[in-house]
Image (tube, helix red, strand yellow):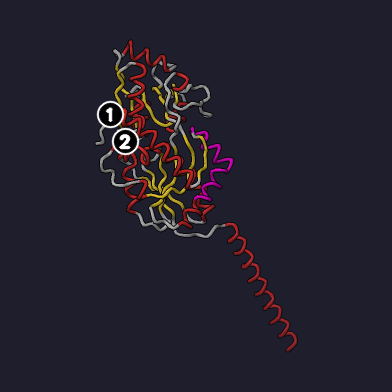
């Protein structure tokens, strides 16, 4: 009887041990497959959902969460060409939980055209890592008869009496200066019509409320492929991989735009160097992933992962180039 009781006790202990070992193994597998959940990292975006910057942020955030082992969320703060988001970055704690995905306008252009932007990118922000370069493009609505840029110039000259309205995503932006330079080059009177971001501008182009617009390639690319707008020319010296049939303005004779705009991540000054390094390395891994590279290229970007130092150098070169252009234009900061 005692022997039978001891045997049952031994069997019960072995069964419990097996259950514990099984549970431990399952937990170990789950732990290996699921990255540890840390405090969320917020990506500020200065433009509304639906635009090119928002699309890039959401693509990258989905991949970065796996590399960083923490939730990564997109926080849209649209308005004033990214100025509101930049001010939010300056005000954010420098604790490694807030970064800002921005292109050249907010970092290199706004501080030159606004008297009191509420931030100084050189002193208030630290570069974290670059994603890509891109070019701006000139496009017309799908209803436009223009099939080439020369067609557009002729249409403005003959049908518009030499005058034409061109949408731009923000006032005092690179597209506004481009509209002015294009008008001077082709001797037509082009007036820049500013919008609160590229999405509402393109909506008006789709509705034929405005016949043309200048914005980044990634803002136009999907509607261009769908035949709803038509990209007629791009800036830069090389045709874009996503638009191989679209000529550059350099080919058309408008030169002097070799410095390409860029996309990069920034953090508040004082953010721990360990976080900057960790985020930069994670970003480089994500951008190098074939599916991410392919999707960014399809958006009209030239993928170019940059270290914090490389992004800082790109920012400085681009800012200096556009300082000369803005000063030559006679523009007075508002």
Q: Nearer the viewer, residue 113 or 313?
A: 313
Vertical arrangement, residue 103 with respect to residue 277, above or below: above
Q: CA distance from mark 1 to mark 2?
A: 24 Å
Q: Main secondary structure of the magenta part?
A: helix
Toward the top, the furthest residue is 158
Q: What SS does tag 1 mark?
A: loop
Q: Position of residue 116 (x, y in %)?
A: 26, 43
Q: Is residue 284 magenta?
A: yes
Vertical arrangement, residue 140 with respect to residue 288, above or below: above
Q: Which residues are magenta?
A: 280-300
* Mark carried by residue 283: none
Q: Nearer the viewer, residue 198 or 1?
A: 198
Question: Going from the N terminus, do you reach mark 1 or mark 2 first?
Answer: 2
1 vs 2, front mark: 1
Q: Position of residue 9 (x, y in %)?
A: 69, 82
Toward the bottom, the furthest residue is 2
Q: Residue at x 43, y 35 (%)?
A: 261
Q: Residue at x 54, y 41 (%)?
A: 292
**Residue 52 figure quarter:** top left
Q: Position of residue 113 (x, y in %)?
A: 29, 36
Give the class, few, some or many, for how many residues have Cα within 10 Å of label 1's Cα (few <14, many ≥20). few
Q: What SS does tag 2 mark?
A: loop
Give the class, few, some or many, for how many residues have Cα within 10 Å of label 2's Cα (few <14, many ≥20). some
* Mark carried by residue 330: 1
According to the picture, the residue beneath numbered tag 2 turns out to be 196
- In the image, 319: left or right of 69? left
Q: Is residue 153 magenta?
A: no
Q: Position of residue 142 (x, y in %)?
A: 41, 21
């Amino acid at each position: 009887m005692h022997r039978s009781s001891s045997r049952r006790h031994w069997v019960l202990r072995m069964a419990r041990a097996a259950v514990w070992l099984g549970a431990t193994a399952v937990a170990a597998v789950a732990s290996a497959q699921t990255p540890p959940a840390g405090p969320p990292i917020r990506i500020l975006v200065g433009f509304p959902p639906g635009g090119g910057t928002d699309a890039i942020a959401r693509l990258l955030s989905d991949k970065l969460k796996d590399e960083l082992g923490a939730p990564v969320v997109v926080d849209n703060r649209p308005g004033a060409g990214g100025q509101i988001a930049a001010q939010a970055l300056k005000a954010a704690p420098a604790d490694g939980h807030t970064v800002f995905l921005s292109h050249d306008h907010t970092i290199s252009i706004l501080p030159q055209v606004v008297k009191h932007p509420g931030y100084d990118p050189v002193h208030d922000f630290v570069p974290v890592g670059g994603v890509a370069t891109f070019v701006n493009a000139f496009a017309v609505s799908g209803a436009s008869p223009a099939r080439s840029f020369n067609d557009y110039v002729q249409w403005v000259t003959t049908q518009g009496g030499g005058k034409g309205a061109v949408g731009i995503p923000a006032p005092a932006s690179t597209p506004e200066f481009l509209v002015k330079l294009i008008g001077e080059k082709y001797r037509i009177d082009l007036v820049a019509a500013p919008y609160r971001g590229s999405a509402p501008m393109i909506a008006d182009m789709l509705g034929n409320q405005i016949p043309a617009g200048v914005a980044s390639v990634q803002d136009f690319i999907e509607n261009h492929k769908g035949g709803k707008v038509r990209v007629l020319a791009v800036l830069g010296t090389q045709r874009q991989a996503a638009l191989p049939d679209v000529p550059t303005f350099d080919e058309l004779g408008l030169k002097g735009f070799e410095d390409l705009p860029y996309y990069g991540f920034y953090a508040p000054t004082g953010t721990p160097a360990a976080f900057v390094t960790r985020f930069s390395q994670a970003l480089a891994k994500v951008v190098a992933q074939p599916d991410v590279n392919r999707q960014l290229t399809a958006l009209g970007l030239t993928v170019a992962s940059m270290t914090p130092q490389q992004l800082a150098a790109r920012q400085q070169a681009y800012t200096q180039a556009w300082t000369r252009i803005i000063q030559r234009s006679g523009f007075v900061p508002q």
